[in-house]
Image (cartoon, rainbow, N blue to C red):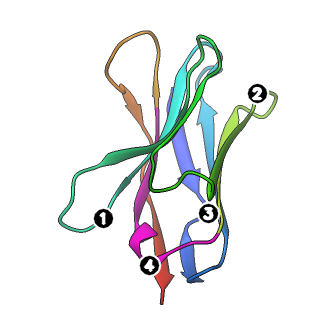
Amino acid sequence: VQLQASGGGLVQAGGSLRLSCAASGRSFSGYDMGWFRQAPGKERDLVAGRYWNGGRTYYADSVKGRFTFSRDNGKNTVYLEMNSMKPEDTAVYYCAARGGSPNWDYWGKGTLVTVSS
């Protein structure tokens, strides 16, 4: 699975952005899909994810109520809708996939999101 993330940019605090992650090579059907972010000097953390088995959606506490994960199986694309953005949301955002392993095996190139105060 090849992943390509897009949609990053500069936004003011309180604004919104939508990130997209298109999968190619094969369908992401059967894969867990996730959005991670890494701020300067910090570790890469899972922000939101959708688990194939059971369809549960996970959100980090820091983004609950503001970010929404969605997927369009027909377009083989997942999205991260980000609202009420804060300067602390500034990071490089990555999409990732895993197929039955505990490790996130497939990664797209990151897309930079900058939130100005």
The Cα atoms of the two marked residues, 2 and 1, are separated by 29 Å
Q: Position of residue 71 (x, y in %)?
A: 71, 35
Magenta range is 84-96
State the mark number for residue 7: 3
The Cα atoms of the two marked residues, 1 and 3, are separated by 17 Å
Q: Position of residue 7 (x, y in %)?
A: 61, 63
The residue pinned by badge 2 equals: 73
Q: Establish if 67 lies above or below 58.
A: below
Q: Position of residue 26 (x, y in %)?
A: 61, 20
State the mark number for residue 87: 4
Q: Nearer the viewer, mark 2 or mark 4?
A: 4
Q: Is residue 13 left or right of residue 61?
A: right
Which residue is nearer to you in this view: 60 or 12? 60
Q: Is residue 89 magenta?
A: yes
Q: Quadrant of residue 88?
A: bottom left
Q: Residue at x 44, y 78 (%)?
A: 87
